[in-house]
Amino acid sequence: MFPKKGKTFPNRQEYASGLAVALQGELGSTHQAVKTLMRWTNANERTAKNWLKGTCGPRGEHLARLVQHSDAALASFLEMAERNSVVMRTTLPSLRIDLMRAVDAIDCCLSVVTEPEPD
């Protein structure tokens, strides 16, 4: 028998619950979230519900389709695979855009507050 080398991937339950947390954070846990997962992956309703509950995780083609649509699922999967540098490269650009929008909104609010009232 060969000795085990390298890093281990999380067990099935950790994988399923990790993706469930990511999907619930992005989509919520309503029936609409189930419908969205079904539309994204062509999975059946029971399968999508199991993913959201964390009972089981997507495999193969479903996982590929899921990460195609969900940044949260992709980030969760890459973190489980200990590919944090890839997570940073994929999330930082969108975080930067969100921060720029927030700064613009703050600047807009401040300009309204600091403008003198007309006499």
Image (spheres, grey):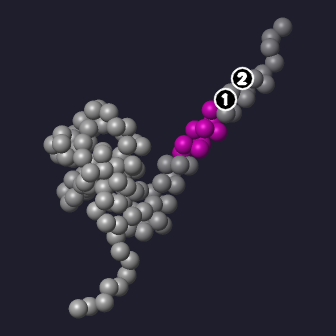
Queried whether the magenta region covers residue 84, the answer comes back as no
Q: Quadrant of residue 109?
A: top right
Q: Quadrant of residue 45?
A: top left
Q: Amino acid at mark 1?
A: Cys
Residue at the spot 45% in from the left edge and 60% down from the top edge? 87
User: Residue 96, percent across and down?
Assistant: 56, 49
User: Residue 35, percent across and down?
Assistant: 24, 35
> Label for residue 112?
2
Quarter of the rendering occupied by the N terminus: bottom left
Q: State if disc 2 and disc 1 touch (CB < 8 Å).
A: yes
The residue range painted magenta reads 97-105
Badge 2 marks a residue whose secondary structure is helix
Residue at the spot 52% in from the left edge and 55% down from the top edge? 92
Front residue of this view, candidates 3 and 113: 3
Residue at the spot 19% in from the left edge and 57% down from the top edge? 61
> Label for residue 54?
none
> Label for residue 108?
1
